[in-house]
Every structure is written in C-alpha cells, then in structure tokens.
Image: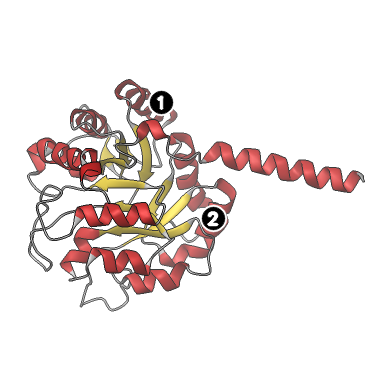
Amino acid sequence: MFTSKKILLSSLLALATASSFAAPIPETAKTNGFAVGPQAWSFNRFSAVEAVEKAAEAGATVIEFFPGQRFSPEGDAKFDHNASPEQIKQIKDLLKKHKIHAANYGVVNIPNNEKDARKIFEFAKELGLYSITTESTDAIDVVEKLVKEYDIRVGYHNHPRNKNNPNYKVWNPEYIRDLVKNRDARIGAAIDTGHWATDGIKALDGMRLLEGRIVSLHLKDRPILGRGTADIPYGTGAVGIAAVLDELKRQGFKGNISIEYETNWDKNVPQIAQCVGFVRGYSAQAK
C-alpha cells in the first residue's frame, strides 16, 4: 500500500514538474490560430533587445532567438544559453512589455554530453520555450533523455544539401523522418521551406513525409524553386504559403512559425510585417 502511494506521488510530482517546464504556446500569442513571428536571425545586424522591439513593430506575437546575437546596442555581450540571470530577466521584462512570447531557440549545436546539453535546456526552461532547434543528430540519445526530463520539444532543422559533404543529411526530409520515427514524440522536424526550395523540394511533399513530427518552421516564400533566389513576402512566390497553412491546420500543428527573412537585412521590418499580415488574413483563403 505504501509503495503504491509512493509511486503515485512520484508520478504526480513528475507530471507537475514537467508541465511547469513547457506549457503550450498560449492562444493569446497566436495570430489567426498560428504562433507567428520573426526568427531573430532576421535582425542579426542588430541586438537581441532590438530584435524584440522590431518583432513588436512588425505586429508579431512570438519570436525565436538564435545563439550568439549581440545582447544590446551597447557593448559586446552576447545573448545565448550562457546568458547571465540579469540578461535573461531583462529580455523577459522586454518581452512582457511588448507582449511577445519567446517560443523557440536555435539553430543551436547540442553537445553530445548531458552536462553541456543540459545548459541549453535550462536556458529554454528559464525563457519558457516551447522548443529548441538543432542539427545535432549525433546527440539524439542525449536530446531524447532531456526532452523527456524537461518536456521541451526539439526539432531537427535543414539547411540546403551540400554536395561537398555527403555526411550532411538533414537537408532530406526522408532522413529526418527516419531519424526521429522511433524516438519520443516531442522530437521531430524544424523545417525550413526556403532551404527545401533551394533543393527543389516542394513544401507540401516534405510536410506530408513528416506528418505528426513537425515541431516548428522557418517559413519562407521564394520566387521559384531552385538555387539563387531570395526571400520574398508570404503569398507572392512559389512555396504556396496558404497551402502550407492549410496543411499545418490539417496536421493539428501546435508549434511556432518563424519568419526568417534573409533579404534587405537593415530594413526588413515592413516585409516581415507583410508576412504577419498574410497569416492574419489567412482565414479569407482558408478552406
């Protein structure tokens, strides 16, 4: 009897602890049902403080941070999983002020050892992140252990295929599908539709291969599928953004959509705002 009560208490404590780490992205942080906002990399010529301010200026409700961005316009301090408690508090206060929800962090290398990897998950816990984005396939055993402990999701990201590096495989959605298929359900794909477009992969084809495993997106539109094209506002190119949103709805997607706008670096807030606006107006096109 005592043993049964002890097991039950341990289970309840574990559940309470896990749920306190990674709550779902709140509905108040969503635009037309989607948690959409910039990847701070879009503002990599500015600081993390300025990135939050620019996200608010663009009408976004969420942001994804990346490792190593300058913390503020003053000084050379960086903002990443080595940030001080004071830096984290300042960012959290700024997010609260601008009503921006921190949803994700990446693309970050997760070391293949628990001690160093844990630092990243602790940072994610402190910010209340939904997920972490990585390409560290070699660390998947460590990732799975910490995903279970922290109840924070991890998505494997794709850059374009590198013909000079045959060991780089995450460009291929089939590889990511096979990598995560027998792993914890909170491990999946952080897909980049722009990089898929570079490799000639149609967004819907890749998404359907990864059904049920899409953790987050770097959602980009491109004029055509193929190399040598730049990001353009949603709905003006060949990726088929409305169809992507349709597919996310069909799959019951709960993660965040990052607008990683790698064009017009110094003055891209209007284009990012246009992308947010497309999602805001999506219901007029929704099926």
Q: Position of residue 26 (x, y in %)?
A: 43, 35
Depth check: give the residue in front, 79 or 154.
154
Examine the rendered structure and indicate whether residue 205 appears above or below residue 278. Answer: below
Q: Amino acid at mark 1?
A: Lys
Taking the view exactly as shown, the residue that stands out farthest to the top is: 97
Residue 109 seen anywhere in this rendered image of the structure:
no
List the residue tagged with mark 2: 114
- Image coordinates of residue 142 in percent, x first then y, are 53, 60
**Farthest residue toward the front?**
287
Kind of residue at disc 2: Glu
Is residue 183 visible in this depiction of the protein? yes
* N-term mark: 2 or 1: 1
Above or below — where is 34 with respect to 206? above
Mark number displayed over residue 89: 1
**Which label is found at residue 122?**
none
- x and y percent of residue 102 in the render? 36, 36
- Colouring scheme, one of rainbow, by chain, secondary structure, one colour: secondary structure
Crowdedness near tag 2: few (<14), some (14–19) or many (≥20) residues, C-alpha within 10 Å: some
Q: In screen coordinates, is 239 left or right of 60?
A: left
Q: CA distance from mark 2 to mark 1?
A: 25 Å
Classify residue 184 by image quadrant.
Answer: bottom right
Q: Secondary structure at mark 2?
A: helix
Would you say the residues marked 2 and 1 are in contact, meaning their CB atoms lie under 8 Å apart?
no
Name the front one of labels 2 and 1: 1
Task: Give the vertical position of 203 relative to 64 (above or below).
Answer: below
Q: Residue at x 47, y 51 (%)?
A: 153
